[in-house]
Image: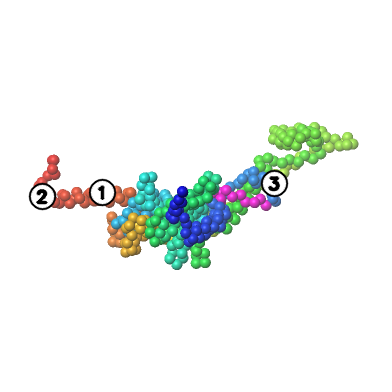
Amino acid sequence: MTVAIALPTLVLSDDEKLSVGALRQRLINVRLHNKIKSNLYEGHTSPEDLGIAAPKDLPDLISAVMGWPGTVVDVLEERLELRGWTGAEGTRLVDVFRDNHLGVESGRGHLDALIYGVGFTTVGRGDANAGEPDVLVTAESTESCTVDWDYRSRRARSALSQTSDEHGTVVMETLYLPNETIRFEKSVGGRLVVVGRDVHNLGRVPVARMLNRDRASDVSGRSEITRPVAYYTRAAVRTLSGMEVNREFYISPKWTALNTDPAVFGMNEDSSPEANRNAAWRATAGFMNVIPPQVDEDGNPVTPVLHEFRPSPPTPFIEQIKAYSQLLAAESGIPAPYLGFVTDNPSSADSIRQQEYRLVKRAERRQTSFGYGWLEVGRLALEIMGEYDVATFREIGVNWRDASTPTRAAAADEAAKLIGAGVLAPTSAVTYDRIGLSPQEQQQLDAERRQSTVATLVDRLRPAGATPEGQ
């Protein structure tokens, strides 16, 4: 007799079924929208041809590309450099930042948040046997991760992350709940089944969300690739296609021969269209064309007449693209020279700062909104390590590199004035950040200062006239 053994940990409850079903449907609903944004960022979008100026199918053959959406996103992301947490010296958050290479990993999450309007970061226990850190922090793809957000508590009720194979088929899922994490894998029959549960009892979902440009009436975030950015890009691509077509006409002058027998140029009705085209090309590209005397039907001499259709230069196309770039710069808040149009006279330092003012302000706003997500990552990491304390956590903040572009000399001069005024201490971490020292450089300076302090203390304690041992 065979006895069936029930495994309750591998069976979903009714609430868990509802959660995973709703999250899967949410991913399906936003899939098309996310794909459009991704294609615009990667330059994989081709605008529809209006069918007026260019010959049929020629724009598809040209495949013009304009990378403006990628520029709009990258220029902003390059000013969002996470440097860790402040006030966390007494915790192991410094180790979490280093072990997970968050200086690199954070950039991935910031990119997705800017492209799609929202980004996600998961926090969990690492597998030491696989060489993972104690606390594993991972930036999840917005195309395969979503959350059910509680706007009152400002954290997730549940979250779902999917992993797909090279064919786009989901082969693994992870359902994040407040007290446990459930893992699904694709079975032999093609269904996703529960294969494991990690009961962590954190009391909160280990997924942090970073929103971009959210507002009270739209709390789901907004992409930097807005409708105006998409339109200006598509219009510029069509203009580039027209310029490519114009180029072909510009480098190949068109001639009209009146009162001339086509056979003079090697063309006749019995030849194939390809042969006639080749003959016309040879006649146009020849150094000299000799046309014998022509006569009409009555035998009267006729004087051949040649007329050249001179094509227009590409200047109107360039000016049109320049106009689109100025509109794009106004929409995205980036300086127009970033889009490739520069003047002969270089801008002054004050002019550069004035042009970058909106971009810097936007970056600082993103640091504020994304910083809330990184604070949640820090709290989850402390919870997993068993080090979370309410009073201690209130003193912790997020450390960002300055979003503006001051020179080293200007930063050093500012720090020197603040030190002279007594606002900053010479060896303070804030001072080191002000002058742009990396965390590794700061640690090296701290180690050298401690070593110097110990040596000075030993010298003071040594009796007068005594010499160091061994001398």
Q: CA distance from mark 1 to mark 3?
A: 71 Å
Front one among 321 and 134 = 134
The residue indicated by pointer 1 is 448
The question of residue 45 being in magenta is answered with: yes
Pointer 1 or 2: first along the chain: 1
**Mark 3 and mark 2: span between their CA atoms?**
96 Å
Q: State the residue in front, 219 or 382.
A: 382
Type of residue at label 3? Lys
Residue type (three-letter) at the residue carrying disc 1: Glu
Which of pointers 3 and 2 indicates the residue nearer the eye? 3
Q: Answer with mark 3 or mark 2, whichever residue precedes in sequence.
A: 3
Pointer 3 and pointer 2: residues touching (CB < 8 Å)?
Answer: no
Image side of residue 90 versus residue 127, left or right: left
| Local SS, label 3 | loop
Q: Earlier in the sequence, mark 1 or mark 3?
A: 3
Give amino acid for label 2. Pro
* Disc 2 secondary structure class: loop
Up-down: is 229 above or below 168? below
State the residue position of label 3.
56
- Neighbour tally class for label 3: few under 14, some 14-19, many 20 plus, Cα within 10 Å: few
Please give the name of the residue rendered at 77% of the width and 39% of the height, measured from the top-left corner. 257
Between residue 415 and residue 436, name the one nearer to us.
436
Q: Which mark is residue 463?
A: 2
Residue drawn at x 55%, y 55% as measured from the top left:
28
Tell me residue 119's x, y (percent).
47, 56
Predominant secondary structure, magenta span? loop
Where disc 1 sits, the SS reads helix
Residue 258, position as x, y percentages in the image: 79, 40
In magenta stretch: residue 170 = no
